[in-house]
Image (cartoon, rainbow, N blue to C red):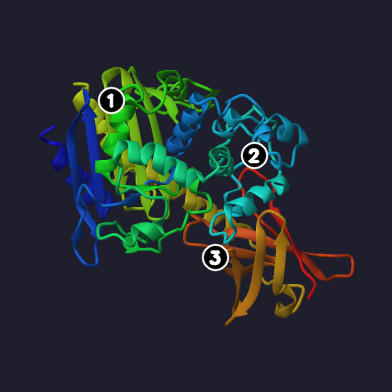
């Protein structure tokens, strides 16, 4: 592993990653635990093993661990209806409402697509979003298709809190953090920013890396609000590699821990590289194989942070990589490099492969923009005066979109997110946002009297446009 530091520094520089931290566990020993680069570029503050990063969806296995602990105590049955525990649980589909189980909640087979913009930036509480689930339409039947779903994880955490008669945060704190000595980990970026060693979030745009605002994830907490450092996360790795036992204490039964690593649902994917194997999803973990070795992993992405937790249980290896750059492939490049080294295998050129993938994605985005420009009908005008398009448009689950005039264009505000709108053609406008690779086309619709009465926005890629209805003016 003597070349690891050199490899990490070189890879970070190539991908413009400000800061990175990595912990490696092998045979129940922490063999590497170091920070690289900067947690705060502007003030030249270095990453340390104690630097807090948002771990985003690496939070999900903590939620399923909490559920497993409750199952060990006879307080939760993975396969009884959710309504046994949450009587007010209600989905758009009545069959799913009655038959959804805790196992379904955490295996991404609810029938719902992501619907992330129903919660992203929302000012609503966890309970309020829980109550709005009934207005989110599914795209598939229950247990037929893998569709990654954060809101069901939020619901799973809400369920944990209700069963424990406290909250998801309090239960995970008491039963996992405190038991493992994870003293620095927390559940909110608000808490992180009150400490003296935390990483700021960064994003690359137009070839330049810039600091961006923190994204508060408190409402959706059980799906991805955790913040931690590699010192704490190394303890998490040790727990998993020691069959659910930490020191002299059995935190979770081996039976429930093993079920987390057991395939619960197949993920229909095309295998891009020969070194990888078909993927399935367990209870809070992706299950695959890397070069013939069983690999259990979960990644996480949220504004300005990217993380990856990986376990090779049969080889007694655990790795966690935390970074403060938005959606960087460096997490996989570093993890797979470590796997190659520890398994004594010839190094695979993951860096070159990821560079090729990034170039292909960039080219695809450019082609989409070109197609949009070529399909635009020039010389058209909106059918109404600009004032007619302003006002508040509401969806029962997605909330309110407010349209206002600013200078010569519209501003759309949804939750706490602000979008720019530029006229495209007719009553169609281009919506741009920093986190969209390409602009989205939104349309204003009229009623039979010719009045603007609704707004259609493609906020869910796998679903028809979300329709927001104009309120009384």
Mark 2 vs mark 1: give the one in front: 1
Specify the quadrant that holds the N terminus.
Answer: top left
Graded by Cα atoms within 10 Å as few (under 14), some (14 to 19) or many (20 or more), the crowding at tag 2 reads many
Q: Residue 341 location in percent, x, y?
A: 19, 27
The dot on residue 248 is 1
In the foreground, 399 or 72: 72
The secondary element bearing badge 2 is classed as loop
Q: Residue 32 location in percent, x, y?
A: 17, 36
The span from disc 2 to disc 1 (Cα, nearest Å) is: 41 Å
The span from disc 1 to disc 3 (Cα, nearest Å) is: 46 Å
Residue 446 appears in the picture as rendered: yes
Residue 96 picture quarter? top right
Mark sitting earlier along the chain (1/3): 1
Mark sitting earlier along the chain (2/3): 2
User: What residue is shown with label 2?
Assistant: 112
The dot on residue 148 is none
The secondary element bearing badge 3 is classed as loop
Residue 177 picture quarter? top left
Q: Residue 321 location in percent, x, y?
A: 29, 41
User: What residue is shown with label 3?
Assistant: 416
Specify the quadrant that holds the C terminus.
Answer: bottom right
């Amino acid at each position: 592993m003597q070349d690891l530091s050199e490899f990490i520094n070189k890879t970070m520089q190539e991908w413009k990653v400000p800061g990175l931290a990595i912990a490696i566990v092998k045979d129940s020993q922490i063999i590497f635990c170091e920070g690289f680069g900067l947690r705060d570029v502007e003030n030249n503050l270095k990453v340390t093993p104690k630097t807090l990063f948002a771990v985003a969806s690496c939070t999900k296995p903590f939620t399923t661990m909490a559920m497993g602990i409750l199952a060990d105590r006879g307080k939760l049955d993975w396969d009884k209806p959710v309504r046994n525990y949450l009587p007010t649980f209600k989905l758009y589909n009545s069959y799913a409402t009655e038959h959804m189980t805790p196992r379904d909640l955490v295996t991404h087979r609810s029938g719902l697509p992501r619907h992330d913009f129903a919660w992203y930036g929302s000012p609503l509480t966890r309970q309020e979003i829980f109550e709005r689930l009934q207005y989110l339409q599914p795209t598939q039947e229950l247990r037929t298709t893998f569709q990654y779903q954060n809101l069901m994880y939020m619901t799973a955490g809400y369920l944990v809190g209700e069963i424990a008669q406290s909250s998801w945060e309090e239960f995970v704190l008491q039963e996992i953090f405190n038991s493992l000595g994870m003293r620095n980990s927390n559940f909110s970026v608000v808490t992180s920013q009150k400490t003296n060693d935390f990483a700021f979030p960064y994003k690359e745009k137009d070839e330049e890396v810039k600091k961006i605002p923190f994204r508060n994830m408190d409402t959706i907490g059980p799906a991805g609000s955790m913040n931690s450092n590699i010192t704490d996360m190394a303890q998490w790795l040790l727990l998993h590699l020691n069959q659910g036992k930490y020191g002299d204490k059995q935190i979770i039964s081996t039976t429930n821990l093993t079920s987390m690593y057991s395939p619960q649902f197949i993920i229909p994917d095309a295998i891009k590289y020969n070194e990888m194997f078909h993927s399935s999803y367990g209870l809070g973990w992706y299950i695959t194989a890397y070069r013939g070795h069983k690999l259990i992993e979960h990644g996480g992405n949220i504004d300005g942070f990217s993380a990856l937790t990986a376990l090779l249980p049969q080889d007694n290896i655990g790795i966690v990589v935390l970074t403060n750059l938005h959606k960087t492939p460096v997490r996989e490049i570093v993890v797979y490099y470590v796997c190659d080294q520890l398994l004594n295998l010839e190094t695979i050129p993951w860096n070159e492969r990821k560079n090729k993938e990034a170039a292909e994605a960039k080219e695809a985005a450019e082609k989409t923009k070109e197609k949009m420009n070529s399909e635009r009908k020039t010389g058209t005008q909106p059918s109404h005066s600009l004032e007619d398009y302003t006002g508040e448009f509401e969806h029962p689950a997605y909330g309110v979109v407010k349209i206002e005039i600013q200078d010569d264009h519209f501003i759309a505000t949804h939750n706490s997110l602000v979008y720019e709108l530029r006229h495209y053609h007719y009553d169609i406008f281009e919506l741009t946002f920093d986190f969209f690779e390409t602009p989205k086309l939104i349309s204003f619709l009229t009623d039979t009297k010719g009045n603007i009465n609704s707004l259609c926005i493609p906020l869910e890629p796998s679903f028809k446009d979300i329709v927001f209805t104009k309120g009384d003016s």
